[in-house]
Image (cartoon, rainbow, N blue to C red):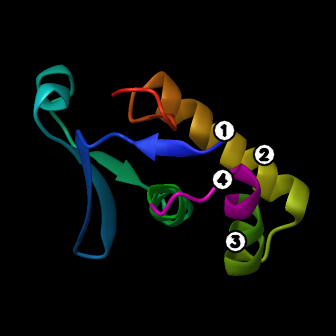
């Protein structure tokens, strides 16, 4: 599955920390920025580039030296959280 990250969340790195900043309508629902782990920030960037789940898991395996099963599980959990929070959508669906 390819995702499209919501334009209502902007990624920022501030003082070495990673954040998703809600803007527009998202800022009405969620006032505070979301702090991301290094892994989540890495995955956000990959998904923003248009990588699919398999490509993201492969890149995660290489970047963080985790096994493929663990990487696939991490990607799946991250994607589910993004979809549930309306921070990303299946490619082709409107935000």
Q: On the image, numbered disc 2 is attached to which residue?
A: 73
Q: Nearer the observer, disc 1 or disc 3?
A: 3
Sequence-wise, the earlier of marks 3 and 2 is 3
Q: Is residue 41 magenta?
A: no
Label 1 vs label 4: CA separation?
A: 14 Å
Dot 2, crowdedness within 10 Å: few (<14), some or many (≥20)?
A: few
Percent x, y of residue 63: 67, 79
Secondary structure state at the residue bearing disc 2: helix
Q: Looking at the rendering, which quadrant does residue 90 occupy?
A: top right
Work out how far the residue at label 3 is from the one at label 2, CA to CA, in angstroms: 13 Å
Q: CA distance from mark 1 to mark 2?
A: 6 Å
Residue 66 vs 81, above or below: the answer is below
Q: Looking at the image, which residue is at 56% across and 62% down?
A: 39
Q: Quadrant of the C terminus?
A: top left
Residue range of the region highlighted in magenta in the rendering = 49-56
Q: Which mark is residue 60?
A: none
Q: In the rendered structure, which disc, 1 or 3, sits on the residue that comes first in sequence? A: 3
Callout 4: helix, strand or loop? loop
Depth check, mark 1 against mark 4: the one in front is: 4
Which residue in the structure is indicated by mark 4?
A: 52
Q: Earlier in the sequence, mark 4 or mark 2?
A: 4
SS for callout 1? helix
Residue sitting at 14 percent across and 26 percent down?
Answer: 25
Mark 3, residue position: 59
Which quadrant of the view contains residue 2?
top right
Characterize the local packing of mark 1: few (<14), some (14-19) or many (20 or more) Cα atoms within 10 angstroms.
few
Q: Nearer the viewer, residue 29 or 17?
A: 29
Q: Could you tell me which residue is drawn at 66 percent across and 38 percent down? A: 77
Depicted 33 relative to depicted 11: above or below: above
Using the rendered view, name the quadrant where residue 86 is placed: top left
Pointer 1 or 4: first along the chain:
4
Q: Residue 42: x percent and y percent? A: 51, 66
């Amino acid at each position: 599955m390819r995702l499209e990250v919501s334009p209502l969340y902007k990624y920022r790195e501030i003082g070495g920390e990673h954040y998703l900043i809600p803007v527009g309508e998202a800022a009405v629902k969620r006032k505070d920025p979301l702090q991301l782990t290094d892994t989540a920030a890495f995955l956000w960037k990959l998904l923003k580039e248009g990588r699919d789940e398999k490509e993201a898991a492969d890149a995660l395996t290489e970047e963080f030296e985790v096994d493929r099963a663990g990487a696939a599980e991490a990607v799946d959990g991250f994607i589910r959280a993004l979809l549930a929070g309306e921070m990303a959508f299946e490619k082709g669906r409107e935000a």
